[in-house]
Protein backbone atom coordinates (compact mmCIF):
# COMPACT_ATOMS: atom_id res chain seq x y z
CA UNK A 1 0.00 0.00 0.00
CA UNK A 2 2.84 2.40 0.88
CA UNK A 3 4.50 1.67 -2.45
CA UNK A 4 1.35 2.58 -4.38
CA UNK A 5 0.83 5.84 -2.46
CA UNK A 6 4.48 6.89 -2.76
CA UNK A 7 4.47 6.02 -6.46
CA UNK A 8 1.30 8.09 -7.03
CA UNK A 9 2.78 11.09 -5.17
CA UNK A 10 6.07 10.88 -7.04
CA UNK A 11 4.32 10.49 -10.39
CA UNK A 12 2.00 13.42 -9.70
CA UNK A 13 5.05 15.65 -9.32
CA UNK A 14 7.06 14.43 -12.31
CA UNK A 15 5.39 11.86 -14.56
CA UNK A 16 3.98 13.15 -17.80
CA UNK A 17 1.96 11.80 -20.68
CA UNK A 18 3.23 10.76 -24.06
CA UNK A 19 3.94 14.32 -25.20
CA UNK A 20 7.03 16.20 -24.07
CA UNK A 21 6.44 19.31 -22.02
CA UNK A 22 6.65 22.46 -24.15
CA UNK A 23 8.80 25.14 -22.63
CA UNK A 24 8.84 28.68 -24.01
CA UNK A 25 12.20 29.86 -25.38
CA UNK A 26 14.47 31.59 -22.89
CA UNK A 27 13.51 35.02 -24.24
CA UNK A 28 9.75 34.75 -23.59
CA UNK A 29 6.67 33.34 -25.25
CA UNK A 30 6.59 30.37 -27.67
CA UNK A 31 6.85 31.05 -31.41
CA UNK A 32 3.61 31.01 -33.42
CA UNK A 33 5.50 28.93 -35.99
CA UNK A 34 5.33 25.96 -33.63
CA UNK A 35 1.52 26.01 -33.46
CA UNK A 36 0.02 23.11 -35.42
CA UNK A 37 -2.68 25.11 -37.25
CA UNK A 38 -5.91 23.86 -38.74
CA UNK A 39 -6.56 22.55 -42.26
CA UNK A 40 -9.47 23.50 -44.47
CA UNK A 41 -9.89 27.07 -43.23
CA UNK A 42 -9.85 28.84 -46.63
CA UNK A 43 -12.99 28.80 -48.71
CA UNK A 44 -11.78 30.41 -51.96
CA UNK A 45 -10.80 29.08 -55.36
CA UNK A 46 -7.80 30.38 -57.33
CA UNK A 47 -9.87 30.75 -60.52
CA UNK A 48 -12.18 33.11 -58.61
CA UNK A 49 -9.33 35.07 -57.00
CA UNK A 50 -8.15 36.35 -60.39
CA UNK A 51 -10.48 36.78 -63.34
CA UNK A 52 -9.29 35.67 -66.79
CA UNK A 53 -9.51 39.27 -68.05
CA UNK A 54 -7.24 40.42 -65.18
CA UNK A 55 -4.66 37.80 -66.16
CA UNK A 56 -4.98 38.71 -69.87
CA UNK A 57 -4.50 42.42 -69.09
CA UNK A 58 -1.41 41.71 -66.91
CA UNK A 59 0.30 39.75 -69.70
CA UNK A 60 -0.72 42.09 -72.53
CA UNK A 61 -3.30 39.77 -74.11
CA UNK A 62 -6.15 42.30 -74.20
CA UNK A 63 -9.10 41.00 -76.14
CA UNK A 64 -7.74 37.46 -76.00
CA UNK A 65 -9.94 34.84 -74.34
CA UNK A 66 -7.91 32.85 -71.82
CA UNK A 67 -9.17 29.45 -70.73
CA UNK A 68 -8.99 28.75 -67.00
CA UNK A 69 -8.37 25.25 -65.69
CA UNK A 70 -8.96 24.74 -61.94
CA UNK A 71 -7.37 22.17 -59.65
CA UNK A 72 -8.65 22.38 -56.08
CA UNK A 73 -8.08 20.39 -52.90
CA UNK A 74 -8.43 20.95 -49.15
CA UNK A 75 -5.58 23.43 -48.55
CA UNK A 76 -4.39 24.01 -52.10
CA UNK A 77 -6.17 25.68 -54.98
CA UNK A 78 -4.58 26.15 -58.40
CA UNK A 79 -5.75 27.89 -61.56
CA UNK A 80 -3.94 27.80 -64.88
CA UNK A 81 -4.81 30.10 -67.78
CA UNK A 82 -3.85 29.44 -71.41
CA UNK A 83 -4.61 30.95 -74.78
CA UNK A 84 -3.09 33.16 -77.47
CA UNK A 85 0.54 33.85 -76.60
CA UNK A 86 0.00 32.60 -73.06
CA UNK A 87 1.56 29.18 -72.73
CA UNK A 88 0.73 29.13 -69.05
CA UNK A 89 -0.01 31.56 -66.24
CA UNK A 90 -0.54 29.70 -63.01
CA UNK A 91 -1.82 30.90 -59.63
CA UNK A 92 -1.39 28.61 -56.65
CA UNK A 93 -2.92 29.49 -53.25
CA UNK A 94 -1.63 27.36 -50.38
CA UNK A 95 -3.49 27.73 -47.08
CA UNK A 96 -2.12 24.65 -45.31
CA UNK A 97 -1.02 25.16 -41.69
CA UNK A 98 2.30 26.82 -40.89
CA UNK A 99 2.54 28.68 -44.19
CA UNK A 100 5.02 31.23 -42.83
CA UNK A 101 7.43 28.50 -41.73
CA UNK A 102 7.10 26.71 -45.08
CA UNK A 103 7.65 30.02 -46.92
CA UNK A 104 10.81 30.65 -44.92
CA UNK A 105 12.05 27.08 -45.49
CA UNK A 106 11.51 27.40 -49.26
CA UNK A 107 13.40 30.69 -49.31
CA UNK A 108 16.23 29.27 -47.18
CA UNK A 109 16.58 26.24 -49.45
CA UNK A 110 16.60 28.48 -52.52
CA UNK A 111 19.43 30.53 -50.97
CA UNK A 112 21.31 27.47 -49.77
CA UNK A 113 21.29 25.53 -53.03
CA UNK A 114 21.05 28.21 -55.73
CA UNK A 115 22.50 31.49 -54.43
CA UNK A 116 25.55 31.23 -56.70
CA UNK A 117 23.40 30.70 -59.82
CA UNK A 118 22.00 34.08 -60.96
CA UNK A 119 19.08 32.42 -62.78
CA UNK A 120 17.99 30.39 -59.73
CA UNK A 121 18.85 32.90 -57.00
CA UNK A 122 15.87 34.10 -54.95
CA UNK A 123 15.42 37.82 -55.48
CA UNK A 124 13.40 39.29 -52.64
CA UNK A 125 10.60 41.77 -53.36
CA UNK A 126 8.96 44.02 -50.79
CA UNK A 127 5.44 45.40 -50.98
CA UNK A 128 3.53 42.34 -52.20
CA UNK A 129 3.06 40.09 -49.18
CA UNK A 130 3.66 40.39 -45.47
CA UNK A 131 7.16 41.92 -45.34
CA UNK A 132 7.49 41.19 -41.61
CA UNK A 133 7.54 37.43 -42.40
CA UNK A 134 10.69 35.48 -41.61
CA UNK A 135 13.14 35.88 -44.45
CA UNK A 136 13.25 39.65 -44.92
CA UNK A 137 10.52 40.28 -47.50
CA UNK A 138 7.00 39.09 -48.20
CA UNK A 139 7.85 37.80 -51.68
CA UNK A 140 10.69 36.55 -53.88
CA UNK A 141 11.24 35.94 -57.59
CA UNK A 142 13.24 33.22 -59.37
CA UNK A 143 14.21 34.01 -62.97
CA UNK A 144 14.83 30.41 -64.12
CA UNK A 145 11.37 29.20 -63.13
CA UNK A 146 9.66 32.57 -63.74
CA UNK A 147 7.94 32.11 -60.42
CA UNK A 148 7.06 34.58 -57.70
CA UNK A 149 6.40 33.20 -54.20
CA UNK A 150 4.65 35.42 -51.64
CA UNK A 151 3.55 34.97 -48.04
CA UNK A 152 0.61 36.89 -46.55
CA UNK A 153 -1.62 36.21 -43.55
CA UNK A 154 -1.15 32.43 -43.21
CA UNK A 155 -1.19 31.80 -46.97
CA UNK A 156 1.41 31.26 -49.62
CA UNK A 157 0.73 32.52 -53.11
CA UNK A 158 2.76 31.38 -56.11
CA UNK A 159 2.48 32.91 -59.57
CA UNK A 160 4.28 31.35 -62.52
CA UNK A 161 4.35 33.19 -65.88
CA UNK A 162 5.23 31.59 -69.23
CA UNK A 163 4.26 33.84 -72.14
CA UNK A 164 5.72 33.79 -75.66
CA UNK A 165 8.15 36.65 -76.16
CA UNK A 166 8.47 37.50 -72.47
CA UNK A 167 11.91 37.99 -71.00
CA UNK A 168 12.64 38.09 -67.30
CA UNK A 169 11.56 41.72 -66.87
CA UNK A 170 8.15 41.23 -68.51
CA UNK A 171 7.46 37.94 -66.72
CA UNK A 172 8.44 39.40 -63.34
CA UNK A 173 6.34 42.52 -63.90
CA UNK A 174 3.26 40.43 -64.78
CA UNK A 175 3.86 38.14 -61.78
CA UNK A 176 4.18 41.12 -59.41
CA UNK A 177 0.93 42.59 -60.76
CA UNK A 178 -0.95 39.29 -60.44
CA UNK A 179 0.47 38.35 -57.02
CA UNK A 180 -0.30 41.81 -55.61
CA UNK A 181 -3.88 41.54 -56.86
CA UNK A 182 -4.25 37.95 -55.57
CA UNK A 183 -2.96 38.88 -52.10
CA UNK A 184 -5.36 41.83 -51.94
CA UNK A 185 -8.32 39.66 -53.01
CA UNK A 186 -7.39 36.95 -50.48
CA UNK A 187 -7.26 39.54 -47.69
CA UNK A 188 -10.79 40.62 -48.58
CA UNK A 189 -12.00 37.00 -48.56
CA UNK A 190 -10.53 36.25 -45.14
Image (cartoon, rainbow, N blue to C red):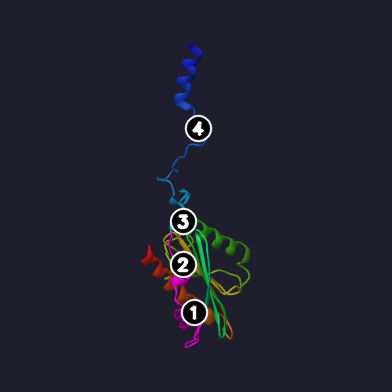
Give the Cα separation between the discs numbered 1 and 2. 20 Å
Task: Choose the circle earlier in sequence order: 4 or 2.
Answer: 4
Q: Which residue is mark 4?
A: 17
Image coordinates for residue 129, horizontal then vertical, percent: 43, 67
Image coordinates for residue 90, horizontal then vertical, percent: 54, 73
Question: Image quarter for residue 116?
Answer: bottom right
- Residue located 47% across and 88% down the image: 63
Image coordinates for residue 134, horizontal then vertical, percent: 47, 59
Task: Choose the circle earlier in sequence order: 4 or 3.
Answer: 4
In contact (CB < 8 Å): disc 1 and disc 4: no
Give the Cα separation between the discs numbered 4 and 2. 41 Å
Image coordinates for residue 83, horizontal then vertical, percent: 55, 82
Give the Cα separation between the discs numbered 4 and 3. 29 Å
- Element marked by disc 1: helix
Q: Which residue is mark 1?
A: 174
Q: Which residue is mark 2?
A: 45
In the orientation shown, which residue stands out farthest toward the bottom? 63
Amino acid sequence: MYVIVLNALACGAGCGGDEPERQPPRGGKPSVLRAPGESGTLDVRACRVLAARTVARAVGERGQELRARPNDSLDLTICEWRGGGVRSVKLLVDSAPRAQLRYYNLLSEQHEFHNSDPARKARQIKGIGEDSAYGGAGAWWTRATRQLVAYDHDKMVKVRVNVRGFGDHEARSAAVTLATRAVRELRRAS
